[in-house]
Image (cartoon, rainbow, N blue to C red):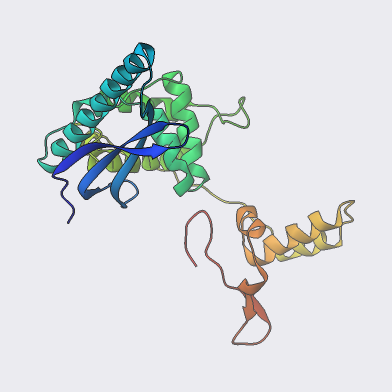
Amino acid sequence: MHECKTVTLRTRPLKKNMLSFYLDYYPGYRDKESMKVIRHESLGIYIYAEPKNQREQNFNAVMSEKAEAIRCRRFESIVNEQYDFFDKSKMKGDFLAYYKKTLRKHDQKWEFVYLHFFNFVGGKCSFEEIDVDLCNKFREYLLNAKQLRRPKRPISRNSAVGYWSTFRGFLKILYRNKLIHSNVNDFLEKIEPEDVVKDYLSVDELYRLAETPCKIPILKTASLFSCLTSLRISDILTLRWEEIVDFAAGGKCVHTVTQKTKTE
């Protein structure tokens, strides 16, 4: 367990008679987002190693004051986390910027939820604004929102179910990382899905489809492949040759993990 005891402001020499400020964390602390142990942090603040005149001395004084202010804020934040004090400065942080940063770790549905929430709040939202009332209003927004790619069509109720579930999952992450005061998710109701009757082709219709001419051969091949394997387009686009394996009863089969449901 890494519990940082001191945060020291230090300098390292650079070329051209300059020094660079950095923070020295002892014995280091574990960043809760990246899970890496941080021991040093460059501040991107520079001063003259040997100021030659009053102007350079004044510059050094101003930059040194800024570096010390950052050191104090970093140490306060670390102490708050170690002793379970809520870091109020985080509440002023940009919720949307943090949300967008997390998209790299998740699938496309997270991006759709982010874009819907971005539209809902008009592009501005801080962590302190995330409360039960705002989230319930977003729930109502999802139930009446239009599709992002087809603005004239409303999103289906089951899509709203998935988006709302994803958003609530993100709220849990925020609470775990102490970015919001309370576990808002405990006070939110889920959206009930509706049963959907899915149409499918009969065997005769599938034969007719196979015999129908198509100007784009690859489109026809892909369509038939999807029908015969039940794979979505997202799964077909990511399919690799090594996922085509020998079937125990003879022939070949597809062994893959689907993009949408994460099932084999």
> Where is 210 relative to 136, above or below?
below
Q: Position of residue 188 (x, y in %)?
A: 26, 34
Q: Position of residue 103 (x, y in %)?
A: 46, 42
What residue occupies the far top of the structure in this picture?
54
Say which quadrant the N terminus sits in: bottom left
Q: Is residue 131 visible?
A: no
Quarter where residue 6 is shown? top left
Pick the front one: 125 or 17: 17
Quarter where residue 120 is shown? top left
Q: Position of residue 162 (x, y in %)?
A: 43, 43
Does residue 142 appear to the left or right of 215 in the view shown? left
What residue occupies the far front of the structure in this picture?
52
Q: Residue at left 42%, top 30%?
A: 97
Q: Residue at left 53%, top 60%?
A: 258
Does residue 124 appear to the left or right of 237 in the view shown? left
Does residue 180 appear to the left or right of 227 in the view shown? left
